[in-house]
Image (tube, rainbow, N blue to C red):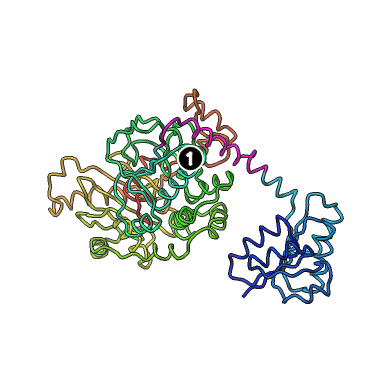
Amino acid sequence: MTARLVLGTGSLAGSLVAELRERRSRLAVLADDENAVRTLREEGVVAEVGDPTDEAVLRGCRRPDTVAVATANPETNVAAAEATASVYPDAFVLAYVPAEATDDQRAALAAAADELVDARVATTDWLDDRVGDDGLRTRKLTAALRDVEGRLAIVTHDNPDPDAIASAVALARIAEATGVEADVCYFGNITHQENRAFVNLLEFDLSRLEPGADLAAYDGVALVDHSRPGVNDGLPEETAVDIVIDHHPPRYPVEARFVDLRSDVGATSTLLVDYLRTLDITPSREVATGLLFGIRIDTDEYTREVSVADFEATAYLVPHADAGTLDRIESPSMSADTLDTIARAISGRQRHGPALLSGVGELTDRDALAQAADRLLDLEDVTTTLVYGIMDGTIYVSARARGTDLDLGETLRDAFGQIGSAGGHADMAGAQISLGLLDAIDADDESLSEILDAIVTDRFLDAMGSRNHRVLTGLYPDDYHGTGPGEPLSLERIAGAAVGSDRAGDGDDDSDQADATDDDPADGESR
């Protein structure tokens, strides 16, 4: 078990002790303040009275693996760090540098300690978080929230996945902190077994809406994990939107009073962690667990489109999350219908070079398509999979890729964008196409199967061969966060503002987003 020793008392030392007490380790405190030591002992902390700069006193402590030098006096910290380095040369030494420390003291601490916590740097970072880009973005978000005079509807995409749900719940917490009541709303169904377990175990309060639902009870609308009303949600296309937060690359300008579209991160949950940290809102265990799971799922366990920001968000969330609940979420039972769909996808697969395509016929669970596409991708020498099926008069398509330069989101847009809606990530995408008059044909009819094969397979293979798959960048400038009140959106305005911007534009994979069927995993499919 790791042994940790804290030298000193005061606010910093107290914060360290409070945090370290929650970890599986042996903790001790050495300080010359008798009253502070007595209080620590009453709280169950092993604490001794002694001079932390005295090598003889330090030798009397149980050998530590880590030592934190945390008094408020720079001279004392220098002496304590040097004494610790002499007595315990193998221990990791963390030393606090008070703001009033001289340059010589800073140099001495740097020489004696392995890592420094510099008050000047911490203050600068704190200010940068609040007045820099992140701070500006956060202030604009909170201003947009405060402008909502009544209740806010936070709408996820259809059949929401963990990233969309967790992001919406986190935004609701931020709204509440600014004095705005909010409901997390969604259209469609939550059918994936992991996603049902996710919502039930974390006890998230979600409101399911029917297409065409009357939102008159709400005075504001926010979209998370997608960016256009009527595209992958049941809202009317003309719905006025106040807030959009998403991580999908955009195809069209997004009109809202506040817009945060950052395609350089792997999950929308990562963006919400930024806001929580900047606003000093500590997430509850349920919210932290949800956001952590959302990041893990959308980045496919940190293997897909993952960024430094995703790792930093994860590091922040881990101490607040419930590992036991995560284990329970990840071990749900699979329905017989899902297993049957996967079996039909495997038995009906057709090989086209490194691609596997499979039609599964009638569907009872759209999320099963995504799981089938994932399973097929495990086959040897397969880099691309596409599985499709029929449900409620619509063809749903789910595709996956690994180890290829093919951009699936663009490929599916090329293949199906003119006859339906499609979109997603480079390695995970989906589409949906209305059957129209073909809906009168029974799903098990061979003629319908042949027609679907021609529609789906031929179009997809043609799009694969075209290699005309672009990734849209540069649509939004760094400082664009929405139109704001009284500022109408125009293509010319955005394009003009974007001149000189070299950032990928942040946004929605729109496309008619159609991961509309599941993907990205924009419909609740998780893996």
* Residue 360 showing in the rendered view: yes
Q: Is residue 48 above or below residue 360?
A: below
Q: Residue furthest right?
A: 104
Query: In the image shown, does 23 or 466 lie closer to the viewer?
Result: 23
Q: SS for tag 1?
A: helix
Q: Is residue 61 above or below residue 173?
A: below
Residue 519 in the image: x percent, y percent?
36, 51
Residue 471 in the image: x percent, y percent?
46, 44
Q: Is 257 positioned to the left or the right of 86 in the image?
A: left
Q: Quadrant of the C terminus?
A: bottom left
Q: How many marks?
A: 1
Residue 505 in the image: x percent, y percent?
51, 40
- Please say whether residue 133 is one of the residues in the magenta stretch: yes
Specify the principal SS of the magenta part: helix
Q: Callout 1 environment at 10 Å: few (<14), some (14 to 19), or many (20+)?
A: many
Q: Is 265 positioned to the left or the right of 508 in the image?
A: right
Magenta part of the protein: which range? 127-152
**Residue positioned 52% across, 35% down in the render:** 476
**Residue positioned 61% across, 65% down in the render:** 21
**Residue positioned 54% across, 28% down in the render:** 496
Query: In the image shown, does 94 or 394 lie closer to the viewer?
Result: 94
* Residue 465 showing in the rendered view: no
Q: Which residue is mark 1?
A: 175
Q: Amino acid at mark 1?
A: Ala
Q: Is residue 180 above or below residue 449?
A: above
- Please say whether residue 135 is one of the residues in the magenta stretch: yes
Residue 306 in the image: x percent, y percent?
51, 54
Picture quadrant where residue 359 is located:
bottom left
Q: Quadrant of the N terminus?
A: bottom right
